[in-house]
Amino acid sequence: MKRTYIYCLTALTLGMTACENYFDEKYLDNGHSQLTDVRKSMTYTLTVDDVNAIGKQRTFKNGDTIPSVYEQKALSLCTETDSTAYTEWKKIASLHAFTEDASADIYVPMFMAQKFPYLDAGTMCNVTYPLYEGKSERVEPFKYVTPYTLTEDDYRAIWNGRGASYISTDKEAALAEFLTTAFPLAATGKIIALTYNFQEENPDTIIPFLPYACSVGQLLEAKEKEEHQLSGIVGTVRSTIYGRFYLVDGSDSIYVYGLNDEDGNRVWKDKGIKSGDEITIKGNFSEESGEPQFINAVYLSHSTPAPAPRRAKAKAAAVQKGPKTVLYQLTDSAWVVYANDRLKAAVALQPDLYEQMGTNVVADPATVIGDWLRRTYLYPQEKEIYLVAYNTSSGYSADEWTFDGTDFVMNTGYVEDVMSFVLNDTWVANISTYYTTPFVGDGPADFTLQTVALDGLNYLWRYQALYGMTASAYVSGTNHPVEGWLVSPKIRLKKSEHPELTFFHAVRYGDPVNNLNWLKVKVTNNYTGDVTTTEWKHLEFPDSIPAGTDFKFLNVGHFDLSEYNNETIVIGFEYNTTAGPIQSMPTWEIQDLLVAEKEEVDAFIKAGNEKRGIN
């Protein structure tokens, strides 16, 4: 059975020992070579306190507010007619994150100068920080949703006076026309969260009577004062002279105030009516006495069936019904049920869930709606997006959830971003460099190792200070079938145009054919946290890999990453000798890795070749 081992390598980047590094002084624009405190693969993650400090004004006890260096920077970017830079800087404190307009490249250099005043020119640091990109543009219109619940007058208008106080499946088609009449001034794009009582079957299907015929329950619900025809069982009798009794229909009943014939004469005993008879009458609904009544009742017919079958029939005729909320949007031509091609589903949270919660608002959407999605959509597919609109204490809102293959993840608008900074005379952002690490002399940075098959070995990949990250399946004179991965952190190709990956590597032993099958570079934009469940794309080596005759380090060439522009990627180095005959196993050594724009990669390769004496 294949067993999986995951090892996390702690970054050794914040150690305080002074060091020189292999990075070319010319490439770093650093002319001195004396012993200095230079970090070439330093990493730092901004804490919440760090971000809040960058976005906060500095106030002294006497009440005077003295601008911090960050506020001064924001003010310096403003003009007499444009204060956008200052407005955006203030958002850092409220969002606890940077934005595209108040970006890390503007303010982090000042933070680095304050945090690490002892570091020397030539230091390079990958800084991880929170970035607020905003929620999906599909969510934005839901800030202005109008919730609307159909009234009794609305039902009457939709049914043309029929009296049903619900919408059937067939009648839902009429809701678009109703919205056109109800919201004549709505602008294109307007969204309505329409709530109504729903029932699958039409009234004619349930009660096949004459026009205005309805059940006692429907009459009590609609309370319409027009003439209706009712059928039911004679219940408790109050007067055998005037024909005053309760008409019972299943669990519903209404008091009938007097019963006449077509000529206006009182009827009861002369018709042989008694309690338990099934009777059909017509008349009007009234609540004038405080109790629902059926007045002006006219006798039509009756029979004396066994009461039990009638009760059974009444129960069998019942249909499922309940409140329902549907999202409608006004297009150029008409109201339609809201939809978007990129969404698997776009729905409103249903009234029954609010009833279960005992509140009409959602205070914790990540938990409440996440649980609801798991119960509602039992077989989601990976990368499917679900939009759910819901009511909050400040009005309607909406959010999107993406199924990541394991669970529904709320798209909050926040991402974890990484930017490279270099210290020359001052700290500056290297915005065309997305990730870099030398490995040699500075540790494995924030790469992780995952070993899938060890075949009895203690490890496969390891860090060696003189050679970088190394892997070999040849130990103590034996070749082993193994599978192990060296996995990068998340690398966000922010505003990238022509991003590329390059590195220097040495390959010793093995043979050129098998080495190409065993040593692979892969990339993904949807890393699951486990190499065995991630969908990877294999990147073919741009140049032929070393022949395996020596440990000479050569540049691998240019891996084009342009198809992942503005996406977040993870790079994986796979050493896998589990397939094929067990022959001489290679040793693979990697150092000097860079993900950057093409021009940066060209300069990086040139500097690395010059350092190694390669033409």
Image (cartoon, rainbow, N blue to C red):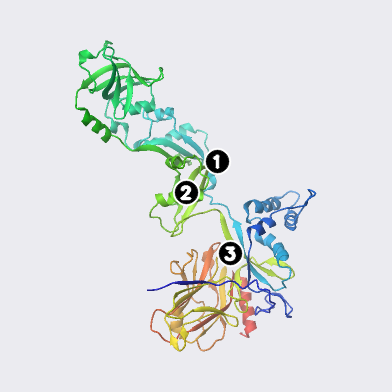
Mark number, residue 615: none
Percent coordinates x, y for residue 140 in the rendering: 54, 47
Residue marked by disc 1? 393
Q: Amino acid at mark 3?
A: Ser
Ranked by sequence position, the earlier of labels 2 and 3 is 2
Of 380 and 611, which appears nearest the observer? Answer: 380
Ranked by sequence position, the earlier of labels 2 and 1 is 2
Residue marked by disc 2? 369
Picture layout, residue 180 above or below residue 551? above
Mark number, residue 496: 3
Horizontal side, residue 214 vs residue 376: left or right: left
Per the image, label 1 sits on a secondary structure element best described as: loop
Picture layout, residue 565 above or below residue 174? below
Q: Residues within 10 Å of mark 2 (few under 14, many from 20)?
A: many
Per the image, label 2 sits on a secondary structure element best described as: helix
Picture layout, residue 370 above or below residue 184? below
The alpha-carbon separation of the residues under discs 2 and 3 comes to 35 Å
Horizontal side, residue 507 vs residue 82: left or right: left
Quadrant of the image for the C terminus? bottom right
Percent coordinates x, y for residue 331 in the rendering: 48, 42
Q: Amino acid at mark 2?
A: Ile
Q: Quadrant of residue 11?
A: bottom right
Q: Amino acid at mark 1?
A: Ser
Ranked by sequence position, the earlier of labels 1 and 3 is 1
Quadrant of the image for the N terminus? bottom left
Of 144 and 562, which appears nearest the observer? Answer: 144
The alpha-carbon separation of the residues under discs 2 and 1 comes to 16 Å
Percent coordinates x, y for residue 281 in the rendering: 27, 20
Question: In this orientation, does residue 129 appear?
Answer: yes
Per the image, label 3 sits on a secondary structure element best described as: loop
2 vs 3, front mark: 2
